[in-house]
C-alpha cells in the first residue's frame, strides 16, 4: 500500500479560502490521514498555497510540496466563493451515483467548448518574487519542486535556466519542471519533471524526466473503461477485480491502478472537494492494488496496459469507437 501511496499526489486546486477555508482544511487533513505525501499547488489557485502551508505545520519534513511560477491568481471573488460553497455542500449531501450523473452532464457540456491554451509570464524578476511569496505562504524554507506553469516551447530561456540554477544553489528548490493542463507534447523539454493531462502521451526514448499525470477522473467515462477492461481479458485473468467494476468509485480505483501498473506515469494527482469521497477512493484503490500485487506476474500488467491504451484511444476519438 505504501508503494501505491508514494505514486499518488493531491492536487490542491480545490483548497480555497473565505467561506470554504474550514472545509478545505478538513480535506487536507483527510489527505494526510489517507497517507498522501505529495501536494501540488500554484499561485494561480488563489488561497491554496496559504491553506496548504497552514495545514502542513508540523509535518512539512514528511511531505513533498510542488508549486509553480508563471500564472497568477486574480483577486478573491465573493460570488465564486459562494458558488464553491454551494457545490461542496451538494457533493457532501448527494450520494455518489447522483454526483457522478451531474459530472457526466457537465463533461458533456464542456466537450463542446474548446478552451484556448494560455501561457505564463516567465520574466525572471517576477519569477523570483513569486517564489519568495510562495515560500512565505507555504511556511517553508524550500520547495521540493518548482514548475514553469504553462510555458511555451520558447519560454525556458537562458535567463530562466540561470534563475532556476540560482534558486537551487540557494537551497530554495530541489527539482524543477514544467506543467500544463494540456498534453505532454505541448511542453518544452526542461527540468526534471513534466506534469500534464493524462492521455495517449508517451515518454520518448531517452526522456528521463519524472512524469506526473492529472485530470484522469475529470474526463472519466466509467462505461467505456469497464468495456476496455473486459475486452482486455483482465477479469478472467484476475476474477477478484470483478467486484470493482460494479460502481463508479471502484472503476475509478481500477483505472488509477491500471495507469500506474500499465503506463510510464510515475505519479497521478487526485483531487476532490469531499473528504469522505477521498477516504473511500484511497481505500478502494489500495484494495485494488493489493489484489493486483497478489497476482504477482507480468500477465496482468500487460492486460492493464492494453486496457489503458484502448481507453485513451477511445477518449481521443471522442468515445466513438
Image: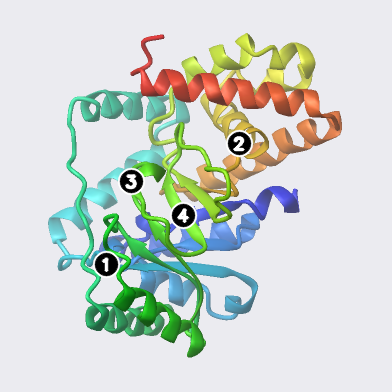
Looking at the picture, does residue 48 appear above or below residue 5? below
Q: Which residue is mark 3?
A: 186
Name the residue located 50 percent from the left edge and 88 percent from the top edge: 169
In the image, 109 versus 320, the foreground residue is 320
Image disc number at residue 194: 4
| Precedes in sequence: disc 1 or disc 4 | 1
Please, what secondary structure does the residue beneath circle 3 have? helix
Q: Residue at x 45, y 76 (%)?
A: 54
Residue 103 relative to residue 53: left or right: left
At 56% from the left and 68% from the top, the residue drawn is 64
Q: Which residue is mark 2?
A: 263
Graded by Cα atoms within 10 Å as few (under 14), some (14 to 19) or many (20 or more), the crowding at tag 4 reads many
Whether residue 139 is visible to the viewer of this picture, yes or no, is no
The 10 Å Cα crowd at callout 1, few under 14, some 14 to 19, many 20 or more, is many
Q: Nearer the viewer, residue 241 or 179?
A: 179
The alpha-carbon separation of the residues under discs 1 and 3 comes to 16 Å
Q: Which residue is mark 1?
A: 70
Residue at position x 40%, y 63% in the image: 41
**Residue 82 visible in this rendered orientation of the protein:** yes
The earlier-in-sequence mark between 4 and 2 is 4
The way the protein has been coloured in the rendering is rainbow
Residues marked 3 and 4 touching at CB (< 8 Å): no
Q: Earlier in the sequence, mark 3 or mark 2?
A: 3
Amino acid at each position: 500500500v505504501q508503494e501505491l501511496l508514494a505514486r499518488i499526489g493531491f492536487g490542491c486546486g480545490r483548497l480555497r479560502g473565505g467561506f470554504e477555508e474550514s472545509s478545505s482544511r478538513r480535506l487536507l487533513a483527510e489527505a494526510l490521514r489517507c497517507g498522501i505525501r505529495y501536494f501540488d499547488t500554484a499561485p494561480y489557485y488563489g488561497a491554496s498555497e496559504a491553506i496548504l502551508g497552514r495545514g502542513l505545520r508540523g509535518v512539512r519534513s514528511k511531505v513533498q510540496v510542488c508549486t509553480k511560477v508563471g500564472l497568477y491568481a486574480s483577486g478573491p471573488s465573493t460570488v465564486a466563493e459562494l458558488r464553491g460553497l454551494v457545490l461542496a455542500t451538494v457533493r457532501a449531501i448527494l450520494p455518489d451515483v447522483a454526483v457522478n450523473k451531474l459530472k457526466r452532464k457537465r463533461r458533456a457540456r464542456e466537450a463542446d467548448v474548446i478552451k484556448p491554451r494560455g501561457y505564463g509570464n516567465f520574466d525572471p524578476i517576477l519569477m523570483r518574487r513569486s517564489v519568495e511569496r510562495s515560500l512565505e505562504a507555504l511556511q517553508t524554507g524550500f520547495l521540493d519542486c518548482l514548475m514553469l506553469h504553462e510555458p511555451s516551447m520558447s519560454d525556458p530561456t537562458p535567463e530562466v535556466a540561470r534563475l532556476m540554477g540560482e534558486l537551487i544553489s540557494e537551497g530554495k528548490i530541489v527539482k524543477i519542471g514544467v506543467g500544463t493542463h494540456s498534453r505532454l507534447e505541448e511542453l518544452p523539454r526542461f527540468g526534471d519533471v513534466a506534469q500534464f493531462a493524462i492521455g495517449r502521451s508517451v515518454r520518448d526514448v531517452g526522456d528521463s524526466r519524472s512524469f506526473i499525470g492529472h485530470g484522469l477522473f475529470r474526463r472519466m467515462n466509467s462505461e467505456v473503461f469497464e468495456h476496455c477492461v473486459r475486452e482486455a481479458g483482465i477479469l478472467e485473468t484476475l476474477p477478484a477485480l470483478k467486484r470493482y467494476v460494479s460502481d463508479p468509485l471502484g472503476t475509478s480505483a481500477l483505472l488509477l491502478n491500471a495507469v500506474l501498473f500499465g503506463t510510464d506515469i510515475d505519479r497521478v494527482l487526485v483531487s476532490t472537494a469531499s473528504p469522505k469521497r477521498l477516504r473511500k477512493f484511497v481505500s478502494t484503490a489500495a484494495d485494488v492494488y493489493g489484489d493486483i500485487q497478489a497476482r504477482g506476474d507480468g500477465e496482468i500488467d500487460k492486460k492493464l496496459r492494453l486496457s489503458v491504451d484502448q481507453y485513451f484511444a477511445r477518449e481521443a476519438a471522442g468515445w466513438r469507437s
